[in-house]
Amino acid sequence: MSIEMEAEKRNHRKLGQQLELFMSSEEAPGMPFFLPKGMVIRNELEYFWKQKHHLAGYQEIKTPIMMKQELWEKSGHWDHYHENMYFSKVDDQNYAIKPMNCPGAVLIFNNKRRSYRELPIRYGELGLVHRHELSGSLNGLLRVRSFTQDDAHIFVREDQIESEIDKVLELVDEFYSEFGFSYKIELSTRPEKYMGSEEIWDKAEAALESVLQKKELPYQINHGDGAFYGPKIDYHILDSLGRSWQCGTVQLDFQMPEKFNCQYIGEDNKYHIPIMIHRAIYGSLERFMAILIEHYAGDFPLWLAPIQAKILPISDKHLPYAEHIKQQFQQVGIRIEIDERIEKIGLKIRDAETEKIPFMLIIGDQEIENGAVSLRRRGEGNLGQMSVMDALDKIIKEKNTLENHS
C-alpha cells in the first residue's frame, strides 16, 4: 500500500468520526467538540502531563481566557499578532480573548515579592487559547481556532538558563519516548520583526545553541523563524509513516519580564529582572491527539484506549453474568462495556474489531459453568478460555506495562 493510501486510511477526521472521538459543527467553525470517547483520551493525556510536571517541579496554574486590551499592547502581542486575535467589549472596556498564555503567567509571578532563592519558578498551564485562522485552512484537530496549549513558563536567573533548558529537553524526550516518537530539532533564530536589541538576541541564541551542543543533539538552524520576543528550539516528531509534525517548542525570552517589570531580590539585596522560558511539549492537546490518531491508526495502546475491553454475551440469558464481570473490572479501573444487542456473536466480534477495542470477553453457557471467559486480543485473535481473574490479571498487567506513568 502506498504512503498516500495508508495516510488516507489513518485520516484523523475519518477515524474521529468512526470511533466517535470528536465532531465539528458549523455553529463553531474550527472549534472542536469532544465526544465522550474522545474525552477519555484527552483526560488520559492531561493526567499524564500533570503527573510528569508534578514530578519535574512544576506548579499548575490557570489564567483567565479574556483580559484587557492594554495587557496585550504591553506584552507586544497587539503589535505583532492582533490580526489573529478575537476581541470583546465589557463595561466600555476593550478586551482580547487570549491567543497565548504567557502574560497571565507573568501577572502571577508579579503577584508577590520574589527572592533569588525561589528561582527557578516553573508554572505549568493547560490553557485554552483562541486564534483566528482562515476558514480554508481549518483541518479537523490539526488546524483549529480554539485549542489547549500545554504551556509552561519558567522564571530563571541568568546563571540558571542552560541548566533549566537542559531539564526541559530531558522532559520533552521523556514525553515523546512514551508514545514511540523519534524527532528532529531546529533552532529558530531572530525574525525580521522582533522586540529588543540585537545584543540580547545574540545572547539568547547562544544560550540555546550551547545546550544543544553540550547534549550532543543534532539540530538544524531555521534562520528568521524565531518568535517575535525570542529564539526557540522547535521539535518535529516523526510518526509511524515517517511524516514530520512540528509540536514542542522551547523559547527564551528576555523581553516580556522587562516589559512587565518582573523583579526578584538578588543575593546582593538589589532588584534583578528574571529571564523567562516559554515551552510546550504536546504543542496543543488537539493537534497532538490528531497526530496520535494517525500515528496509531486509531488502534491506541491500552492505557489510551477509550474502551479497553468489551463483554460479548452470546444471548440475553448471559447478561447477568456479564454485568457481574463488568463490575469486577470497573472496580479496578478498567474501562469496559457490554454489547447487549440481540445479534450473532460473529457480528459482535466484527463490530468490536471495527471499534478497535483491545480486549473482547466472550461468554456463553460453558463460560458461566466454568466461572470463566473466552478472551480475544485485537490483532492476536482468540487467547482461549480462562478464569475471570486470569483474564483480569492479563489486562491489568498489559495496562501497567504500557502505563509507565501510573
Image (cartoon, rainbow, N blue to C red):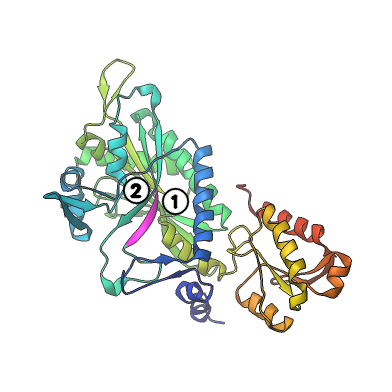
Helix, strand or loop for disc 1: loop
- Is residue 273 visible in the rendered structure shown here? yes
Q: Crowding at label 1, few (<14), some or many (≥20) Cα neighbours within 10 Å?
A: many
Q: Quadrant of residue 310?
A: bottom right
Helix, strand or loop for disc 2: strand
In the rendering, at what x and y percent does residue 37 appear?
53, 65
Q: Crowding at label 2, few (<14), some or many (≥20) Cα neighbours within 10 Å?
A: many
Above or below, 356 relative to 69: below
- Is residue 216 visible in the rendered structure shown here? no
Q: Amino acid at mark 1?
A: Ile
Cα gap from disc 1 to disc 2, whole angstroms: 13 Å
Q: Is residue 393 left or right of residue 233?
A: right
In the rendering, at what x and y percent does residue 253 appear?
29, 41
Q: Would residue 147 be counted in the magenta stretch? A: yes
Q: Amino acid at mark 2?
A: Lys
Task: Please name whichever residue, 291 or 329, is drawn nearer the observer in this view of the structure.
Answer: 329
Image quarter (top left, top right, bottom left or bottom right) of the N terminus: bottom right
Which tag, 1 or 2, sits closer to the chain's start?
A: 2
In the rendering, at what x and y percent does residue 55 appear?
53, 38
The residue located at (56%, 57%) in the rendering is: 179
Above or below, 289 relative to 23: above
In the rendering, at what x and y percent does residue 229 appear?
25, 45
Name the residue beneath numbered marker 1.
Answer: 281
Which residue range is magenta in the image? 146-150
